[in-house]
Image (spheres, rainbow, N blue to C red):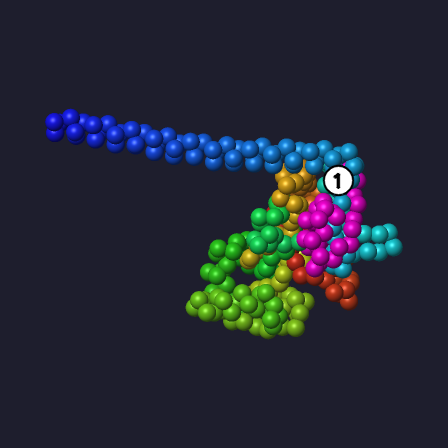
Amino acid sequence: MDAGWYSGKRTLLNARRRTCLFAIGFAVVVVAAGFAFQAIAGYVRSENLWAGQQQYGAIRFGIDPTIVPVSFYDSSGWTGMDADVALEICKRVHLRVESDPVGYDAQYDALFVGRVDVLISALIQESSRSREALFTQGYFEAGLSALYLNGYVAPFDSGSAPQIFAGRRIAVELGSGGDLYLRRLLRRGVGVDKVLVGSTAAGVALVRSGSVEFVLADGLDAAQFTTSDLATSVVASDPYVLAVRSDQQRLRVEMDKALATMRADGTLERIAHKWLAPDRALGNRDVDFVHGSFYSMGQPD
């Protein structure tokens, strides 16, 4: 009797266990099917949007036309480094460029309501937007850079910068990104001799005179001062990117392909050199340049 009771109990437990496992397995299948359906639906929507883009024949870029020399208006219309990047992307995907001056504060609103297809104009990737927007690969390094005499040290990256800077004299503008960076190094116990200057130009003059070893500047300034006697290394990467809505995966893929070929064939370097070459930039120091440097594309000759 006892044996039969235990046997029946085991049978009941096994049946319950099988039922539980079946329920769990069924739930997993349902959840997986839901994710698969969402992925397929997202892919279909993305492809349909891309087909509509091709039928329309243009990409509508949301721009901030107040950023010389990156994005601004002249007598010919929208121009600058980003305008040339947008034009070259469109050439490679066989579409026209249309620009809409949405401004900085309203740019994401314009993107999400469908007023524009792409955001450009000195745009930095925002992690807070990662759920609702997709970002392309970087095309211009706008992060903090170090300028120094060519050959003084080998090119270095952000990881080795603290060791390179230890014990060196470094020029920065008060309150700039370079100033904040050196303050963090000092709090970490890295001994640097900080020299405050009024401008990147003043810091470069000190580097050339041998009074300091480095000057820290944001990317555009660094690019505009990079000549044959000066080298640049990126200290904190922060590249310019383009942004699309999260349902525009295909558009993002096509722009990434275009940017990759533009980098490989030197187009990005030529565009940056056109707008940021020292002979051009230094002849226009009255212009209020935004700060920003080259992104994985070398330096101008």
Residue 28 placed where, x, y %? 43, 34
**Residue stretch in magenta:** 94-122
Residue 38 lies, with reference to residue 83, above or below; the image says: above
Residue under label 1: 90
Q: Nearer the viewer, residue 226 or 238?
A: 238
Image quarter where the N terminus lies is top left
Q: In the image, residue 254 lies at what x, y percent?
A: 67, 37
- Left or right, 272 with respect to 231, comes to right
Assess disc 1: are there few (<14), some (14-19) or many (≥20) residues with their C-alpha within 10 Å of its C-alpha: many
In magenta stretch: residue 107:
yes
Residue type indicated by callout 1: Cys
**Residue furthest right in the image:** 75
At horizontal 46% and vertical 60% (from top left) the residue drawn is 163
| Figure check: 65 above or below 183 | above
Residue at 63% from the left image edge and 61% from the top image edge: 218
Res. 120 in view: no
Q: Total marks drawn? A: 1
Q: Nearer the viewer, residue 53 or 277?
A: 53
215 sits left or right of 162 in the view: right
Where in the figure is residue 184, as x and y percent of width and height?
49, 67
Q: Where on the picture, by quarter, is residue 65?
A: bottom right
Q: Secondary structure at mark 1?
A: helix
Whether residue 175 can be seen here:
yes
- The front one of 31 and 225 is 31
Q: Tell me the residue at 52%/54% (across/down).
A: 157
Taking the spot 62% from the left edge, 47% from the top edge, the residue there is: 133
Residue 192 among magenta residues: no
Residue 97, x across and y down, in percent? 78, 43
Q: Is residue 184 left or right of residue 88?
A: left
